[in-house]
Amino acid sequence: MRRLTFLTGTILTFSVFLTSCRDTAEKEVIVKEVEVKEQVRTPEEAQEKEGILERTAKKVDKEVNKEIDEEIEKIGDDN
């Protein structure tokens, strides 16, 4: 019985040593940097490239700015 316990312990010890020293394959990640040249666009081309959210945001900004300007005019100059 003692021999069986010793043999089992020895086998487990060696299996741990052998699996811990095993080489692992490392993956190499290659990243290439690419220079992107911006093209000069006319305002019409820029508007075509914009999405619906950008166009809507610009319209909302214009409306909000109008309302702010109107409120400023109502307040007037206190100086």
Image (spheres, rainbow, N blue to C red):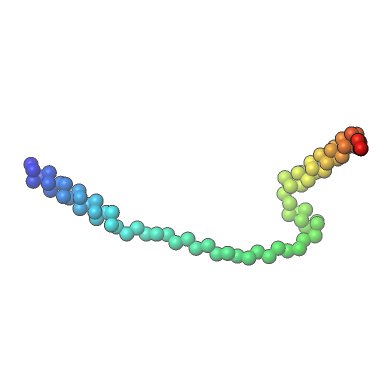
**Is 53 above or below relative to 44?**
above
Whole-percent x, y for residue 18 in the image: 24, 55
* 38 left or right of 7 in image: right
For the point 28% across and 54% down, the residue is: 20
**Is 44 above or below relative to 63?**
below
Q: How many marks?
A: 0
Q: Quadrant of the C terminus?
A: top right
* 56 left or right of 21 in image: right
Q: Is residue 63 visible?
A: no
For the point 76% across and 44% down, the residue is: 57
For the point 73% across and 54% down, the residue is: 49
* 54 left or right of 5 in image: right
35 or 73: which is nearer to us? 73
From this viewpoint, which residue is outermost toward the top? 75
Whole-percent x, y for residue 30 in the image: 50, 63
Quadrant of res 69: top right
Q: Quadrant of the N terminus?
A: top left
Whole-percent x, y for residue 29 in the image: 47, 61
37 or 44: which is nearer to us? 37
* 73 left or right of 52 in image: right
65 or 73: which is nearer to us? 73
For the point 53% across and 62% down, the residue is: 31
Quadrant of res 45: bottom right
66 or 54: which is nearer to us? 66
Q: Is residue 33 visible?
A: yes
From this viewpoint, which residue is outermost toward the front? 79
Whole-percent x, y for residue 52 in the image: 73, 46
